[in-house]
């Protein structure tokens, strides 16, 4: 008996990052992590920076980082409109660590200065941490 799947798309302002049939998708929402299966009730939610984990038709797990956005679950499709989204297998750990270190240094510099700049740096840091978490999870799955 074939397992039920659902169409899944991840779209950023620049491109369609992913378009596949999946068995399930786990995403980081502002209210916590949720897993969506085929025939899930329709919903919309805000995504926070974190890791998207999907189980593909073949049973493989795939991992992505997302820096925020929205998820819409419909009867026959799941769409994520993301600020940025990157597949874990395309991430470069050295570049992530450099960007994280720069963001942390700028965050310390601006702690007592400008709230808007501080918030922007904090968001950048959160994005880099999500990328690193996705890469770590993907490596663990591939072992």
Image (cartoon, rainbow, N blue to C red):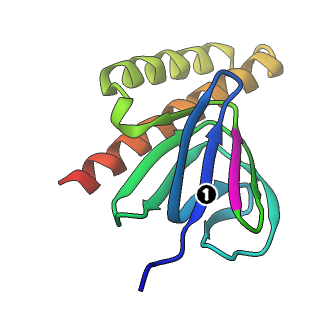
Q: Position of residue 5 (x, y in %)?
A: 54, 69
Q: In which quadrant will I find the C terminus?
A: bottom left
Is residue 120 found left or right of 114 in the rendered image? left
Q: Position of residue 20 (x, y in %)?
A: 52, 50
Is residue 35 found left or right of 114 in the rendered image? left
- Residue 142 lies, with reference to residue 104, above or below; the image says below
Query: Of 96 and 60, which appears nearest the observer?
Result: 60
Q: Considering the numbered disc 1 on the image, is that residue within a helix, a strand or a loop? A: strand
Question: Magenta-highlighted stretch: main secondary structure?
Answer: strand
- Residue 142 lies, with reference to residue 91, above or below; the image says below
> Would you say residue 73 sits in the magenta stretch?
no
Q: Residue at x 70, y 50 (%)?
A: 79
Q: Within the image, what quadrant is residue 141 found in?
A: bottom left
Q: Residue at x 44, y 79 (%)?
A: 2
Q: Position of residue 43 (x, y in %)?
A: 81, 65
Q: Position of residue 36 (x, y in %)?
A: 62, 68
Q: Which residues are magenta?
A: 77-81
Q: Residue at x 51, y 61 (%)?
A: 22
Is residue 82 found left or right of 51 in the rendered image? right
Query: Of 70 and 38, which appears nearest the observer?
Result: 38
- Residue 47 lies, with reference to residue 35, above or below; the image says above
**Circle 1 is placed at which residue position?**
7
Q: Residues within 10 Å of mark 1 (few under 14, many from 20)?
A: some
Residue farthest along the front direction in this orientation? 1
Q: Residue at x 71, y 65 (%)?
A: 76
Q: In which quadrant will I find the N terminus?
A: bottom left
Residue farthest along the left direction in this orientation? 143
Q: Within the image, what quadrant is residue 45 found in?
A: bottom right
| Numbered-mark total | 1
- Residue 60 lies, with reference to residue 17, above or below; the image says below
């Amino acid at each position: 008996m074939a397992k039920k799947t659902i169409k899944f798309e991840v779209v950023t302002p620049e491109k369609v990052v992913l378009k596949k049939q999946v068995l399930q998708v786990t995403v980081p929402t502002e209210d916590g992590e949720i897993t969506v299966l085929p025939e899930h009730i329709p919903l919309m939610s805000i995504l926070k920076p974190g890791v998207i984990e999907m189980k593909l038709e073949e049973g493989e797990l795939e991992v992505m980082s997302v820096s925020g956005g929205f998820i819409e679950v419909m009867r026959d499709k799941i769409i994520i409109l993301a600020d940025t989204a990157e597949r874990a297998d395309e991430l470069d750990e050295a570049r992530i660590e450099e960007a994280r270190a720069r963001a942390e240094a700028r965050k310390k510099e601006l702690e007592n200065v400008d709230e808007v700049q501080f918030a922007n740096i904090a968001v950048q840091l959160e994005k880099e941490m999500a990328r690193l978490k996705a890469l770590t999870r993907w490596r663990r799955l591939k072992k």
